[in-house]
């Protein structure tokens, strides 16, 4: 296989230049761990390799390890770079003009040295023969791997940084909880507006997504969307990754449901949430589908499971209430989520159709989505999504067990739910969730949005608790 032939450049006469925007540091108070401490932990894992080095190309791995951020990829605060880490130093391959002097000076204090981006391949070619290079084959392009001298020993494995990054520290967890309050308040302001705007008419999928971004942008700490909002009405919602375009966006009118999947970037936090919004009066079958999906969310949200369990093994917990009616969905139930990084983060993935790999496990500190769905082509689609944090639940003679803390704070609109489908214990979970949403978001809202929040979190199983 030839990897030294550039097939793209001849076809792109106006190919964009490499980014030149500055990189910036993530404060230790956000990261919860200094760059030096992260490097020390990585080197501990390299110590058993003799003259071992770790080569990193995955942008989120580099950004997390060095407590740096950038703006080179839409929605993802990362920057183009490679890194070569050994026992003494880090060689960061990046356009040096992008690293401000003050940032460069602090990097040097931690043994991080800037080298030109284009020299990463040559650096690999010059590694000594007695070296052992740890490379993640799923996160490194073949051309770079082939640059290694044949004498160099290669260890292909999941990058230690992937596993380190996936377990959020206490500071990251606190920042995520704070971001969920801001994000939830923005969603409540938006949804209160939506309820009033729908009867007046004139809305389409694109304009609604723009209004949601406007509400999020009012949050002091909002840094941008974590992905392009999926705003899908009626049959468009049956396409799980639908994107509305201005000239093709469906008008939101009549009866049905709107699927809204969106997220934001905040200090040390990334959000991802899906909610169903009623437009007019959803019909009985639509509401039953919403109830089935909600039952799946509830089932996995309150599960208890062994620490280190293969993530695909818990997929059936969320699907069981949906399977019971002979229904399934084609995407995974959950993915890892970063902290002011990628909204889809390795290694955990809750999907029974996926490969069962040793590193695809659920560990304490991981943030994961729970997002079952039902899609009826040409008719409608349903998805409800919360983010959850895996944390210690119990230690018994049978080992360590984990459970999930629900992080997302936003009402689940019961006008889209056939409550008769839910069991009494599921109603208890729903009421408890809405009590917590109301408690955490009430101080951030006033006027119409506050009244909307209180109405949408009213208890189903009894009177509203004040």
Image: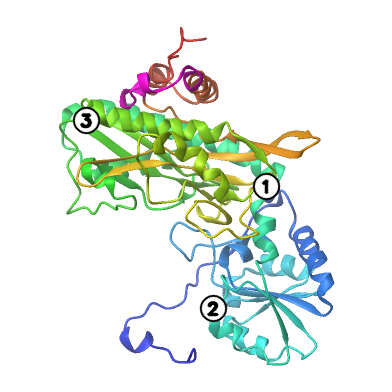
**1 vs 3, front mark:** 1
The stretch in magenta equals 414-427
| Residue 451 placement (x, y as % from top left) | 39, 17
| Closer to the eye: label 3 or 2 | 2
**Relative to the observer, which residue lies in front, 157 or 167?**
157
Q: Which residue is mark 3?
A: 198
Packing grade of label 3 (10 A; few <14, some 14-19, many >=20) is: some
Q: Earlier in the sequence, mark 1 or mark 3?
A: 3
Q: Which mark is residue 141?
A: 2
| C-alpha span from label 2 to label 1 | 28 Å
Vertical placement of 173 versus 451: above or below?
below
Of residues 70 and 242, the one drawn nearer to the viewer in this rendering: 242
* Residue 201, quarter of the rendered image: top left
Q: x and y percent of residue 62 in the render?
A: 63, 66
**What's the residue at 49%, 92% (across, down)?**
4
In this picture the colour scheme is rainbow
Q: State left or right for residue 111 relative to residue 301.
A: right
**Residue 219, visible in the rendered structure:** no
Would residue 33 be found to the left or right of residue 437 on screen? right
Place of residue 89 in the rendered image (x, y in percent of width and height, measured from the top left): 78, 74
Secondary structure at badge 1 equals loop
Disc 1 designates what residue? 363
* Residue in the picture at 67% in, 58% down: 163
């Amino acid at each position: 296989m030839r990897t030294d032939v550039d097939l793209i450049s001849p076809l792109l006469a106006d190919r964009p230049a490499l980014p030149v925007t500055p990189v910036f540091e993530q404060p230790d108070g956000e990261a919860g761990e200094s760059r030096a401490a992260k490097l020390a932990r990585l080197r501990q894992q390299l110590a058993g390799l003799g003259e071992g080095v770790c080569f990193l190309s995955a942008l989120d791995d580099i950004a997390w390890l060095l407590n740096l951020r950038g703006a080179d990829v839409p929605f993802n605060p990362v920057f183009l770079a490679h890194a070569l880490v050994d026992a003494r130093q880090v060689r960061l391959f990046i356009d040096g003009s992008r690293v401000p002097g003050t940032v460069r000076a602090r990097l040097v204090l931690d043994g991080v040295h800037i080298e030109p981006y284009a020299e990463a391949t040559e650096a690999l070619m010059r590694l000594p023969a007695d070296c052992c290079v740890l490379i993640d084959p799923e996160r490194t392009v073949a051309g770079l791997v082939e640059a290694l001298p044949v004498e160099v020993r290669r260890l292909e494995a999941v990058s230690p940084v992937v596993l380190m990054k996936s377990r959020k520290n206490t500071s990251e967890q606190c920042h995520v909880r704070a971001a969920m309050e801001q994000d939830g308040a923005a969603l409540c302001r938006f949804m209160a507006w939506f309820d009033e705007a729908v009867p007046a008419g004139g809305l389409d999928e694109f304009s609604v997504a723009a209004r949601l971004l406007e509400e999020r942008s009012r949050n002091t700490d909002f840094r941008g969307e974590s992905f392009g909002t999926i705003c899908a009405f009626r049959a468009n919602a049956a396409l799980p990754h639908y994107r509305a375009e201005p000239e093709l966006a469906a008008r939101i009118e009549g009866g049905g449901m709107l699927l809204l999947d969106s997220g934001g970037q905040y200090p040390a936090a990334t959000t991802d949430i899906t909610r169903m919004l009623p437009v007019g009066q959803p019909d009985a079958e639509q509401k039953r589908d919403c109830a089935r999906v909600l039952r799946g969310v509830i089932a996995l949200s309150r599960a208890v499971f062994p620490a280190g369990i293969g993530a695909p093994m818990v997929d059936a917990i969320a699907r069981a209430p949906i399977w019971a009616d002979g229904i399934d969905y084609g995407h995974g139930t959950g993915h890892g989520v970063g902290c002011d990084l990628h909204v889809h983060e390795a290694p955990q993935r809750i999907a029974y159709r996926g490969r069962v790999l040793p590193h695809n496990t659920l560990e304490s500190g991981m943030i994961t989505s729970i997002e079952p769905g039902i899609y009826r082509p040409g008719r409608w689609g349903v998805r409800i999504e919360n983010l959850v944090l895996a944390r210690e639940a119990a230690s018994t003679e049978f080992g360590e067990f984990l459970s999930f803390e629900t992080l997302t704070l936003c009402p689940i609109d019961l006008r889209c739910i056939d409550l008769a489908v839910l069991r009494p214990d599921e109603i208890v979970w729903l009421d408890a969730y809405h009590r917590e949403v109301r408690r955490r978001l009430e101080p951030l809202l006033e006027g119409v949005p506050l009244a909307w929040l209180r109405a949408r979190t009213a208890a189903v199983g009894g009177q509203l608790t004040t």
